[in-house]
Image: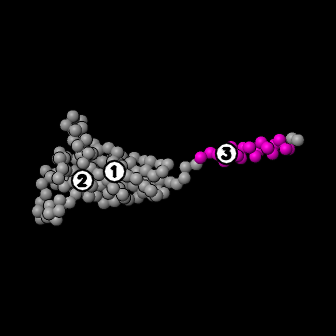
Amino acid sequence: MKNVFFLIVIILCCFVSGCHKTTIGYLITENASYEPDTMYIRKNPIWEFDSIRIKNKAPWVSLQLQGYEGTEVIYFDVESVTFVEETPTSQGIQASKTFMDELSIRSGGVLLYPFENTAIPGSYKISIRISNPGYSHVLQDVMTIIVLE
């Protein structure tokens, strides 16, 4: 009788531990980065360098994010934009908000900023969220975008 009771307890323990929901898949972002990690946007494009962009009103585009691995489908979102200044001001906060509203991200982590924009010249730090089912990670200040006059 003692052996039967012991066997039932072991079987019940197996059933209880087997009911634990395990997250399927993985997401590794420790080596994720943009190369190069700085993008320059000219408010007044130079014809010699930007003639095709001017003709087509093509957006400013970064390269893809590199160094991440994970189970498909991987999603990218712009988490935050910070206007780089010595002391935060309301103008800097508004510049960040405006920049974030105009910035978009597509598959592969490619950042797009429209040719015709309302950005205030300066430096912006971009943080993105990379996620897939069951996992999510924010890459802080992973890209710097410098808007030139």
The answer to which image quadrant residue 112 occupies is bottom left
Q: Can residue 50 be seen in this view?
A: no
Comes first in the chain, label 1 or label 2:
2
- Residue positioned 62% across, 45% down in the render: 20
User: In the image, is 88 to the left or to the right of 136?
Assistant: left
| Label 1 sits on residue | 142
- Residue positioned 12% across, 65% down in the render: 48
Q: Can residue 100 be seen in this view?
A: yes
Number of disc labels: 3
For residue 113, the mark is 2
Looking at the rendered structure, the kind of residue marked 2 is: Tyr
What secondary structure is marked by label 2?
strand
Give the CA separation, mark 3 to mark 1: 40 Å
What secondary structure is marked by label 1?
strand
- Where is residue 28? Give x, y as percent: 46, 54
Compare residues 127 and 4 and report the one nearer the observer.
4
What secondary structure is marked by label 3?
helix
When the figure is inspected, residue 72 is found, relative to residue 16, above or below; the finding is below
Give the CA separation, mark 1 to mark 2: 16 Å
- Where is residue 25? Give x, y as percent: 52, 54
When the figure is inspected, residue 125 is found, relative to residue 63, above or below; the finding is above
Tell me, yes or no, whether the highlighted magenta stretch contains residue 14.
yes
- Where is residue 79? Give x, y as percent: 34, 45
Compare residues 102 and 96 and report the one nearer the observer.
102
